[in-house]
Image (cartoon, rainbow, N blue to C red):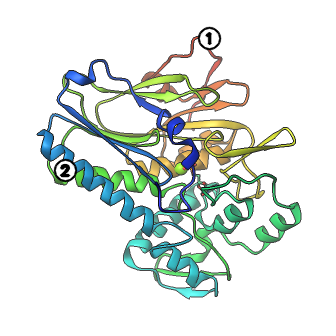
Amino acid sequence: MISSPFWPGRAGLAILALAATLLSGCAREEPEIRYRFPAMGTLVEVTIYDFPAEAADEAARDVEDLFLKLQREWDPWEGGALAALNAALAEGGEIRPDDELSGLLARASRISAASGGAFDPAIGRLVKLWGFQDAEHLPEAPPPAGEIEQLLDSTEPLPRIWDEQNGVLTAPANTVIDLGAFAKGVAVDRAIELLRSLGVRHAIVNAGGDLRAIGRHGDRAWKIGVREPRNSGILAAIEIAGDESVFTSGDYERFFDYQGHRYHHILDPRTGYPTQDLVSVTIIGANAGDTDAACTALMVAGHGHWPAVAAALGITQVMVVDREGVIEMTPPMQKRVKILREEPPTIKIREVP
Ligand code: AMP
Ligand code: MG
């Protein structure tokens, strides 16, 4: 069981675990261990290759401890440092977060500004108004339009309330910081750092389909599957050798239908409503934290605008799927992916400016 009420997706563990699947040929004969545990609302899988079995097992358990600690620390609503920060923000005024949170806020604020506000961790209260913070229950209907409007009027984006020079947050009362679009990536990065510090050179940390891979799988690259956003099939395969992250944000991860319309958990901070035109965004990036945040930002940017936001974030390898099933991708991504859909999709190539 997952102890935190915040991290969403408990109901979808099995499905999420397929979001990116390891496509390995003969895993049982390989010197490889796989260890799975639930954390941050999803199933995390640690794969370690070519490392003494007992030590690999211990390392994977250390990764589990790390994830559970970070899950507690970064839950916006209860338990750890972020919840304490949000409790202090209820009063408004000036707050100086501890060094770890300051580092995260500084980084998130820079990404938020570069994305033109598409990624904005200061929208925690909006996430709650919609009811997407509750891992146990999905909302049944959208909140009243008037309440959304009122909330937007009284919310400031993170770059406006975070004073990087002084490490101080000066926010309107009741501001809630929600790092849900970013924290899983940062946790994956920390896990990879931890594994490396233990001497592991070939591994994947996969948090419900969002992963970072280092090294190789013996004499071949790691092979990753990206799931179809509208069924349980595999949309594409990507090979990774070296050190890369592959993350996906999608409207299928947490949603409800109301009067024939899908409402999902990625919210456009400008309108207060779930994003409309893309069903998924997959990015291959360097570190997992930046890649995670960028996926969310590009979902919000949407059709027409995502290439410019990708450019602003320094992202070059992007694949998006729209509501008609059309795939758009950048030329560098096209070189990396092998589309596995039986019925060949319409593919459009988009340059990142
Ligand atoms: P992800 O699955 O990485 O795209 O993150 C989605 C989660 O991030 C949601 O469940 C919310 O908690 C939070 N979130 C939703 N919309 C945004 C946004 N525009 N910017 C930052 N965080 C968001
Ligand atoms: Mg994200």
Tell me the crowding category of disc 1: few under 14, some 14 to 19, or many 20 or more residues within 10 angstroms, Cα based: few
Q: Is residue 132 left or right of residue 337?
A: right
Between 229 and 311, the residue placed more toward the observer is 229
Q: Residues within 10 Å of mark 2 (few under 14, many from 20)?
A: few
Relative height, residue 350 to residue 44 (above, below): above
Residue 305 drawn at (x, y percent) = 67, 42
Q: Which image quadrant for residue 86? A: bottom right
Q: Nearer the viewer, residue 55 or 285?
A: 55
Select label 2 or label 1 by which is in front. 2
Give the answer, above or below, for where 30 lies relative to 34. Answer: above
> Does 61 sit left or right of 151 as displayed?
left
Q: Position of residue 233 (x, y in %)?
A: 55, 22
Q: Is residue 59 above or below residue 75?
A: above
User: Which amino acid is tagged 1?
Assistant: Glu
Q: Which residue is mark 2?
A: 58
Spatial separation of the CA atoms under disc 2 and disc 1? 43 Å
Residue 193 in sight in this render:
no
Which dot marks residue 343? 1
- Residue that appears at 13% across and 44% down: 54
| Element marked by disc 2 | helix
Q: Position of residue 138 (x, y in %)?
A: 69, 52
Q: Quadrant of residue 299?
A: top right
Task: Indicate left or right for 36 with 171 as reference.
Answer: left
Which kind of residue does numbered mark 2 sit on?
Glu
Precedes in sequence: disc 2 or disc 1 = 2
Q: Position of residue 169 (x, y in %)?
A: 54, 80
